[in-house]
Image (cartoon, grey):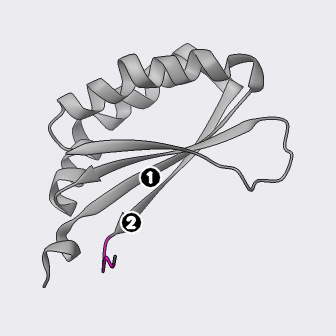
Amino acid sequence: MTEFNKMVIYNVTTHVEPSIEQEWLLWMRQIHIPKMLATQKFTNSKIYKVINEQDQGGISYAVQYYSDSQELLKQYFEKEAPLFNKEEKEKFGNRVLFFQTELQLIEEQS
């Protein structure tokens, strides 16, 4: 197994109402992502804006959190994820909708 096979990416795609886009981005940058990284389950994160979506009355972002192993990600889901999901729901309610995927890096080329 190569070193890449161990890395896991936790991808959260979020659909945000335009009226709260800047508030949500600020919250992500200043509060949520620093708290995620503080769990020590993730080495870094990246925020991407989805640019090829159909007009659904909102803006979508993909936030990726990089973890060194599936085991660390499993620990995150068991310990921290319920609290983080609750915090986001309490702050933004149904003005943000998200879905999560787990990706495993198989190969990287440059």
Which of the labelled discs sits on residue 11, or is there none? 1
Q: Main secondary structure of the magenta part?
A: loop
The residue nearer to you, when weighing 87 against 8, is 8
Q: Which amino acid does label 2 sit on?
A: Leu
Q: Is the residue 99 above or below the residue 38 in the image?
A: below
* Magenta region: 105-109
Q: Is residue 37 above or below residue 12?
A: above
Task: Residue 54 in the image: state x and y as whole percent.
Answer: 83, 53
Which amino acid, mark 1?
Answer: Asn
- Seen at 33% across and 79% down, the residue is 109
Query: How far apart are the two marked residues, 1 and 2, measured between alpha carbons?
Result: 7 Å
Q: In the picture, which quadrant includes the C terminus?
A: bottom left
Residue 103's tag is 2
Q: In which quarter of the image is residue 16?
A: top right
Q: Which residue is drawn at 20% across and 45% down?
A: 43
106 in magenta: yes
Taking depth in this image into account, of 17 and 85 the one nearest to the observer is: 17
Residue visible at 47% across and 18% down?
A: 27
Q: In this view, does 32 lie above or below 9?
A: above
Mark 1 neighbour class, 10 Å CA radius: few under 14, some 14 to 19, many 20 or more: some
* Residue under the image location 28 percent in, 25 percent down: 35
Q: In this view, does 13 lie to the left or right of 110?
A: right
Name the outermost residue toward the front.
Answer: 110
Q: In which quarter of the image is the N terminus?
A: bottom left
Q: Residue 80, position in %: x, y? A: 27, 33
Q: Where is residue 91 in the image (x, y as percent from the top left)?
A: 54, 14
* Cβ–Cβ under 8 Å for marks 1 and 2: yes
Q: Earlier in the sequence, mark 1 or mark 2?
A: 1
Give percent across and percent down for residue 93. 63, 21
Task: Kindly state the secondary structure of the residue where label 1 is placed.
Answer: strand
